[in-house]
Amino acid sequence: MIILKICAVIPAYNEEENIAEVVKKTREHVDSVIVVDDGSEDDTAHIAEMMGATVVSHLVNMGKGFALETGIEKALENGSDILVTIDADNQHDPKDIPRLSNILINENLDIVFGSRSLDGDMPLILKFGNWWLCKSAQLLFGTKVTDSQSGFKAFRRDAYEKLKWRSSHYSVDSEIIMNAGTNKLRHKQIPIKTLYNCNHKGTTVIDGIRIFLNMLLWRFKG
Amino acid sequence: MIMGIQIIGIIFALFMIYLTFLYYKRGNYRFRDFGIWMFIWLSFMGVVLSPTSFGGLLNPLKVSRLMDLFTILSFMTVFGVIFFLYLITRKNEEKIKKVVREIALKGGKQ
């Protein structure tokens, strides 16, 4: 039996309050953890390193998409087979990692998306934005993913070439869905637990509009 | 006699000439760039001081008023400059990406 090496990639920007817990919980379920410190001005990198993560640091803040790409390249360099991406703000439960990776392996899929429930305690504006972006993605790219902005996903090393994104910022999650759809990758989504803390600093309304415009552009660029 | 908007135009041109000189003295750009920008501001001042000298261009260019001619030329210049600035920004963005990633993967930031 081949043992697949699982690596979690966590892009982080000024997350000194959450990163220790996220790394600690994530390490229990993967072989290695890579934290991409995206130009943080606080102690994120140091804390992540202390907690046992491999840390790669950007000199300046480059955005989530770019940070994710740096992390994935590092993971591929280290010979990882399964790549799990998870947010650094402690909104995801790392206990879901085995579910994502097991489904990916057992059902021979290319990518598994963690889908946050729209019925949960997601803030109203996020609920609407997410619903709007999901419907757009379904319509434009033929995917069935119902959470277009979830940063929690698992994919195979081989699938990365087809998933490769150009977005530097929050559009990355939508672009990954689009690439999975247009390249006809075998994908599935599974519900995940989500915790929203009040210091939400993720996608804003402006980001949402930018993501929507990007989706239109990608669709008509072909 | 210099009137109304011409005064504003001259003050603007003089201010830009001052800034061009100041930044050249500070070493922000080379003599060639200094020369180009000085030429631009002096030409601008020439147009402001003597707009009627461009009257001969109206008929061949099929423009009815001098104001229209200047407006069209200004728009063309502004869009041209924006396009070139966009290209430069994109190029620099790509360079920054390359440098940041290379340093990150080599573990350069301490």
Image: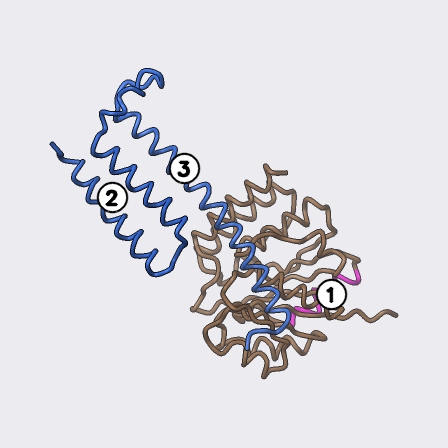
Chain colours: A brown, B blue
Q: Residue at x 26, y 33 (%)?
A: B47
Q: Residues within 10 Å of mark 3 (few under 14, many from 20)?
A: few
Q: Residue at x 45, y 64 (%)?
A: A201
- Image location (x, y in percent) of residue A22: 58, 75
Q: Gap between marks 2 and 1, in whole Å?
A: 61 Å
Name the residue beneath numbered marker 3.
B79
Q: Chain of mark 3?
A: B
Q: Nearer the viewer, residue B16 or A215?
A: B16
Q: Main secondary structure of the magenta part?
A: helix
Question: Along the horizontal axis of the image, is A156 left or right of B60?
Answer: right
- Image location (x, y in percent) of residue B102: 62, 65
Q: Chain of mark 2?
A: B
Q: Chain of mark 1?
A: A
Kind of residue at disc 2 = Ala
| As drawn, B87 above or below B101 | above
Give the extent of the magenta segment.
Answer: A95-106
Q: Nearer the viewer, residue B27 or A208?
A: B27
- Image location (x, y in percent) of residue B75: 35, 33
The part of the image, by quadrant, that contains residue A100 is: bottom right
| As drawn, A175 above or below B45 | below
Question: Along the horizontal axis of the image, is B68 left or right of A80?
Answer: left
Kind of residue at disc 3 = Phe
Kind of residue at disc 1 = Ile
Of marks 2 and 3, the one in the foreground: 2
Quadrant of the drawing holding the N terminus of chain B: top left
Q: Residue at x 56, y 64 (%)?
A: B100
Q: Nearer the viewer, residue B46 or A20?
A: B46
Name the residue beneath numbered marker 2.
B13
Residue B9 among magenta residues: no
